[in-house]
Image: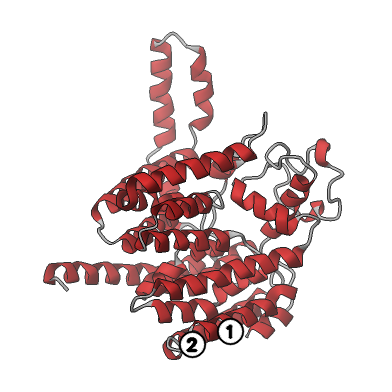
Amino acid sequence: MAVGLLLSPDARERLAPYLLLYLAAAAISLLAARILPASGPGFLLLCGALLRATLLARTPDLSDDAFRYLWDGSVAARGISPYAFAPDDAAVSEIAPDLRPRVAHRDIRSVYPPVAQAAFRVFGAGGNLLAWKAFAGAADLSVVALLWTAGGPGAGFAAALYAFHPLPVTETAGEGHVDSLGVALLLASLLHVARVRRALAGIAFAMSVLTKYVSLAAAIPLLRRSRFKFLAAVAVTAAVLWLAASRPGASPLGGLGQYATRWDFNSPVYSAAARLMDAAEIPERAKGVFLDLKERWNHPDWTRGVFPYFYTAFFARALLGVVLAALLAWIGLRVADLETAVFASLAALLILSPTLYPWYLLWILPFAARKREPAFLFLSFAIPLSYALLHPVPGVSRALLYACEFAPFALLGVWTLVRSARGLRTGD
C-alpha cells in the first residue's frame, strides 16, 4: 500500500484512487495492531521506518504546508525573522525564488511558534524538502517508541497501530507536517510526569506548545498533577524560547490572529454555530445594542475598533471558545486520570475547532490507540475524505462527506460515553 501511495498520481487530480489505497492501508494497520503487539519495539520501529521511508520521495500534493516551512527556514537562515515579513513583502522577495511560488497564503506572516521555526531552520533551510520530510518522519517514528515505552495494557496495540497507521505515515513522511514533533514532545511530557520527572515534563510540554499551540489544551490536567516544578520549568523554557524568537517589531505571534479569525474547514460544529448566529441574527442584535451604548457613552474613540467584530464568523468562534473554555476547565478539574484528561481535552479542542484538517488528528491518535477508543479511531481512518472539500470528486457533496465522516463518529462517541457512564456507576 505504501508503494502504491508513492506511485499514485497527483492526489489533487486523482483523489479517489488515493483514498482507496488509504482505506486499504487502514485495514492493514488494524490487522497489524491485532497480531503484532507482542512483536517488540525493534520490529515495529523497523516496519514504521520502512513505511515512512517509502513516502519520502513523494512530493507533497494534498497540502502545501511543507513549502511554507521551507520558506520560513530559508528566511531565518538569512538572519531575518519569518514573523517580520510575509512572503509577498518586497523586503524578502529575492529569498528562495524557486520555492516562493509554491507557498500558499503569501500575504500572511508565519503562524508557526519558535520551536517549529528552529526545526525549519535546521532541517528546511535552502529548500531541502527531502531532509525536512525525513525529519518529520523520524519525529513521527519516535511516537511509536514513546507509545511502547509508556507501558500498560494498551502499549503494544497502540505502538503497532501507530507504526502502520496510514494517517501519520502519509501526513508526516508524505506531506511533511510538523505536528509529529509536537505530539512526540507532548507524549514525552506525560511520560516524564508518570516517572515523577516534573522539570523535564515541563520543558517537554513548553517545547510542544511552542511547536504548535494545540498542546495548550492539555495545560490544566498537567498543571494540576505536576504543580510547582512543572510550572516553573514551563515558564522558564517558554520565556527563553519566546524571547529568543522575538525581535523588534516581529512578535512570534506573527499572522496567528488572521489564522484564528479567517480559517475554517471540515467542521460541522462550527458550521452549525454559524448558522445559529445567522438564524438568530445575533451579530445584528449585538451591534444594535452596542450602538445604543455608544451613543449613551458619547461616542468614545475606542468604540471604533469594535465594529469589525460584528459578523457571523466572529460570534460563532466566540461561542465555541466559551464552550471550549468551560469544557477544558471541567475536564482538567474533574477527570482524575491524567492520560484520560489530556485525551478528553484534545478531543474537545478538535471537535470545537473551526478548522479540522486531517493532520490535526495526529494529536489525538496516540491516545485513541492506547484507549482503543472507537470514535476517534474511526475518524482517523475517515478524515482524509475531507480532502474532497479542497479537491472535489464528481458526485460527492459536502453533506455526503460530513455524513460519512461524522455520523458514525458521533454514534460511536455517544456509545463510548454511555459505556463510560455505566462503568462509573458499577465501579468497573
> Residue furthest toward the top?
298
Residue 7 screen position, x and y as percent: 73, 81
> Which residue is found at the position 25% from the left and 58% from the top?
336
User: In terms of image quadrants, where is residue 43?
Assistant: bottom right
> Residue furthest toward the left?
426
Residue 33 screen position, x and y as percent: 45, 84
Between 374 and 114, the one nearer to me in the picture? 114
Between 303 and 156, the one nearer to me in the picture? 156
Q: Are marks 2 and 1 in contact (CB under 8 Å)?
A: yes
User: In terms of image quadrants, where is residue 192?
Assistant: bottom left
> Which residue is found at the position 54% from the left and 83% from the top?
42
Mark 1 — residue?
Answer: 47
Quadrant location of the C terminus?
bottom left
Above or below for 24 versus 216:
below
Mark 2 — residue?
Answer: 32
Q: Amino acid at mark 1?
A: Cys
Q: Earlier in the sequence, mark 2 or mark 1?
A: 2
Instruction: Examine the rendering and report whether any part of residue 39 can be seen.
Output: yes
Between 40 and 415, the one nearer to me in the picture? 40
Is disc 2 placed on a helix, strand or loop? Answer: helix
Above or below for 323 versus 146:
above
Q: Is residue 82 left or right of residue 337?
A: right
Q: Amino acid at mark 2?
A: Ala
> Residue furthest toward the bottom?
35
Is disc 1 placed on a helix, strand or loop? Answer: helix
Quadrant location of the N terminus?
bottom right
Residue 58 screen position, x and y as percent: 73, 73
Above or below for 303 versus 78:
above
User: In terms of image quadrants, where is residue 193?
Assistant: bottom left
Query: Mark 2 Cα within 10 Å, few/some/many (few <14, many 20+)?
Result: many
Q: Is residue 128 left or right of residue 386?
A: right
Q: Which disc is residue 265 wearing?
A: none
